[in-house]
Image (cartoon, helix red, strand yellow):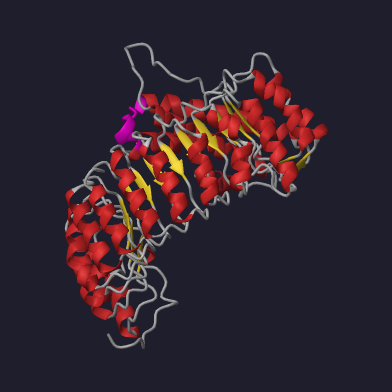
Amino acid sequence: MDSAVLTQQTSRMSTKLWPPSKGTRLMFVERITKNLITPSIFSRKYGLLSLEEAEIDAKKIEESAFHRANEHHKEELFSDGSSSVLLYAKRSSKFMLEVLRRGPTVIDSTTLEITQDLNKETVFDISGRRRSFIHTEEAEELVKPLKSSCNSYSRICFSNSSFGVGAARVFQPVLASLRNQLKEADLSDFIAGRPEAEALEVMGIFASALEGCQLRYLDLSNNALGEKGIRAFGSLLKSQNNLEELYLINNGISEEAARAVNELIPATPKLKVLHFHNNMTGDTGAISISEIVRRSPLLEDFRCSSTRVGTEGGVQLAESLATCTHLRKLDLRDNIFGVEAGIVLSKTLNNLVNIVEIYLSYLNLEDEGAEALAIALKESAPSLEVLDMAGNEITAKAGPALAACISSKQFLTVLNLAENELKDDGAILIAKALEEGHGQLSEVDMSCNLIRNAGAQHLARAILNKPGLKMLNINGNYISDDGVNEVRDILKGSPDVLGPFDDNDPKGEDN
């Protein structure tokens, strides 16, 4: 997130990008400090750091990231340093996120109590290497840091690699010896290109090595698991009772595989994050996932998008979410819920008062479903920041309910109603809802809504004095050339806010 600062500084130098200058490092510390003291979703949950504490943490973060990137640079004899710059930024971002999640610590007159020593290496991560098949000889070199008797690794990341059976067996005894200290395991995308039989054996080897670890974080994404892959990880999954984050993204999980997940992970009382994006789960699979959700009362972040779930599965998921009263982020995009599931979800929303982000685009909600959800959200979710209901065939009929909801959400930062059929009447209602307050608004997407001049101009005026506004997208509508010029004139003081008009049709069909 701050690699741009580094790139700007180093691009003025020679082709040697590492190490950064002292001035660049100081600037980076200042940027980290600013991020740590800026109010955010993390500060509302964990507390906001004082400037004094943020400055101390920022220095530790930068020093730790620099040390790791510098070691990496020493290993690459003929590198221009670009990979070290990238690692420097990535490590800094990771450590900063850890501090934000930790929140402020106790400070007395002489001592700042730091709960985690960032200078101590806690992450074993090989994902930054060039993507390749890992064979036995290379594995024997890679595993050496894990063999150190005094290592403090609590997180392993093997993503962006491809382990063969020989390499997996090299790591097996070493990982097994670390069972009592490992808390996070990222095994995403670590068998790419392997034949099915070999891939399944590799999964089984890692599962047996990590079985019994009390993990709080497990990522098995991007491995084309299917039911066979899920069951290959069975011994690991069945031994988990303390999971807080589970990621099963893009795993080819069918209804049978979803049933296996439900069967193999019977206990999720501490689960806070469950991501199940881009699978082929269908309705029957969604029913299995809903059972996991029901067993996860502390869930804060649930993603079940692009999973081919229809009305039956959508209803089950919506009902199961009623028990998740701590939920802050809900992403159900790109499914086939329909009106019925939308209405059931609207009833569930009455219980989800802590929702901050909700993504409900491309669910076939239509006016009836959208109205029910807007009415429910108006009465709940007082801190809503992101509202996404794009691509739901919503017309101006649902405009009053949507406008009333939006008007009440003064913390809104992102509003996405793209690819609906709101036309001018609906757009004007939305614009009026945004006129008062909404000082944190940063993005409004009303593209592809059959909007003409009047609606476009109302939207432009509505966001005119929003200090944080970064983008108004009204592309793909029916705005005349004169109308486009009028909108540009309204926003002439902030020309960068206005998105492109390359898909606008100034001679669009009549309303």
Q: Residue furthest right?
A: 137
Q: Residue at x 63, y 40 (%)?
A: 159
Quarter of the figure with residue 444: bottom left
Q: Main secondary structure of the magenta part?
A: helix
Q: Percent position (x, y) of residue 141?
A: 78, 29
Q: Residue at x 45, y 36 (%)?
A: 32
Judge from the rendering whether residue 73 lies leftward or rightward of residue 400; answer left or right: right
Q: Residue at x 66, y 18 (%)?
A: 177
Judge from the rendering whether residue 446 lies leftward or rightward of residue 373; answer left or right: right
Q: Nearer the viewer, residue 464 or 190?
A: 190
Residue 404 to residue 172: above or below: below
Looking at the rendering, the stretch of residues picked out in magenta corresponds to 42-52
Is residue 3 part of the magenta span, yes or no?
A: no
Judge from the rendering whether residue 162 lies leftward or rightward of residue 99; answer left or right: right
Residue 510 to residue 331: above or below: below
Q: Percent position (x, y) of residue 508?
A: 35, 86
Q: Residue furthest top?
A: 110
Q: Residue at x 30, y 37 (%)?
A: 326
